Amino acid sequence: MNLINFLNNLFKYDGFVLIDSSSKKYVIGKPIKENPIIVKLLDKNLNYKLLWNPDLYFGEAYMNGSLIIENGTLSEFLEIALRNIGRSDINIYGKILNTIKGTFRYLTKFNKGLVSKNNVSHHYDISESLYDLFLDANRQYSCAYFKNENDTLEQAQENKMNHITKKLNIQANQKVLDIGSGWGTLAIHIAQKTNASVTGITLSENQLEYSKKKAKELNLGNQVEFKLADYRELNQKFDRIVSVGMFEHVGRKFYRKYFNTVSKLLNDQGIALIHTIGSSNPPRNPQPWITKYIFPGGYTPSLSQIARPIEDSGLIISDMEVLRMHYAHTLRNWKERFLSKKNTVLEMFDEKFFRMWEFYLASCEMAFKWGDQVVFQLQLTKDNTSAPTTRDYIY
């Protein structure tokens, strides 16, 4: 199979024009637009690279400028592509790669203490100014909760914090642990809304410094404590445990250790809430481009990979919610803000970095819209009586 045959077999809906490195033009699929999107390949090696491992090499080519999109945007092309691919492997080679790599699935992602810290630093300690360009004012770098698709990013992030806080059913003066507290916004929100005592832990030195400063400015120093610590280092008990957007970085080999630790740290009548990106597909390997350039050590688990270690830890899944389109809306907002600040990004970094982050945000948006990516919110307890029997307390 050559690249042109592969693409024509893949694109059943809509299409585009491909111009290869020798300037040959091919119509792929059945383009709907009168002036369809044009994809130009400037490197002849892409003819076989995109056939063998498009999950890696398409993003690399766009980032390096050896693949150019005209008559449309990257997002518009990815929308067409992901709509055709859906939740499936792109081609037979993708299935073969997943089978080969799957043999070593358990042996990958040894995210021990120092490795985890380095992985976090790779992404979160780049530049605080970068995140200020596209996140909301409170620097929430996780899926927002859109009660309405037209909610602003700020409103949707506030919705998310309120939703999680209600699910935790926190009482005044209880002790709350936030695993992977980021820039401290959720921990501070919980302290302000519930009058609880909150401990937030992170592996990012930049985030720690920012969180401590923010808590001090709000006169919450006696109520909120932030630490540079790995969850595996803790020994004290908590009434509530929350973790948002951190489980993706735990590493597949450590799921059992993670939930055993949550169980150890949680009081007998306690409630935990784990908010994580996940996959609606059976277990598979991480997206190779994201792993190489954005989140080394990251992995979005299938529900089946999470359920067994939870059960083995003695915890109960007392409630579960699957957020589907919410992250697509969140990423769309981040992407639009990021693109609007292109000149600023270029002053801070370079064109390659800009294209890398554009591809990251746009491809992830489409993975949540058309692919297998979702968000799991798992409420965990040790006792059937720990949480209310209906969801009235949430809504």
Image (cartoon, rainbow, N blue to C red):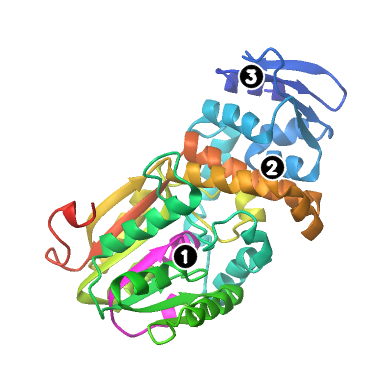
Where does the image place residue 189, in percent across and percent down from the top left? 39, 68
Q: Could you say which is closer to the camera, residue 269 or residue 138? A: 138
Q: Within 10 Å of the Cα at label 3, are there few (<14), some (14-19), or many (20+) other Cα atoms?
A: many
In the image, the segment drawn in magenta is 231-255
Cα separation, mark 2 vs mark 3, equals 19 Å
Describe the element under mark 3 as helix, strand or loop.
strand
Among the two numbered marks 2 and 1 on one chain, the one whose residue lies closer to the N terminus: 2
Quick one: which residue is furthest to the bottom in this view?
Answer: 222
Tell me if label 3 and label 1 are in contact, CB under 8 Å: no
Mark 1 highlights which residue?
A: 250
Mark 2 highlights which residue?
A: 59
Identity of the residue drawn at 16% across and 67% down: 386
Q: For the residue marked with disc 3, what is the amino acid?
A: Gly
Quadrant in the picture for residue 196: bottom left
Where does the image place residue 146, in percent across and percent down from the top left? 40, 45
Residue 76 vertical placement versus 119 (above, below): above
Quick one: which residue is furthest to the front in this view?
Answer: 218
Q: For the residue marked with disc 2, what is the amino acid?
A: Gly
Residue 110 vertical placement versus 341 (above, below): below
Quadrant in the picture for residue 236: bottom left
Q: Could you say which is closer to the camera, residue 360 or residue 55? A: 360
Query: Does residue 249 belong to the magenta stretch?
Result: yes
Q: Nearer the viewer, mark 3 or mark 1?
A: 3
Mark 3 highlights which residue?
A: 15
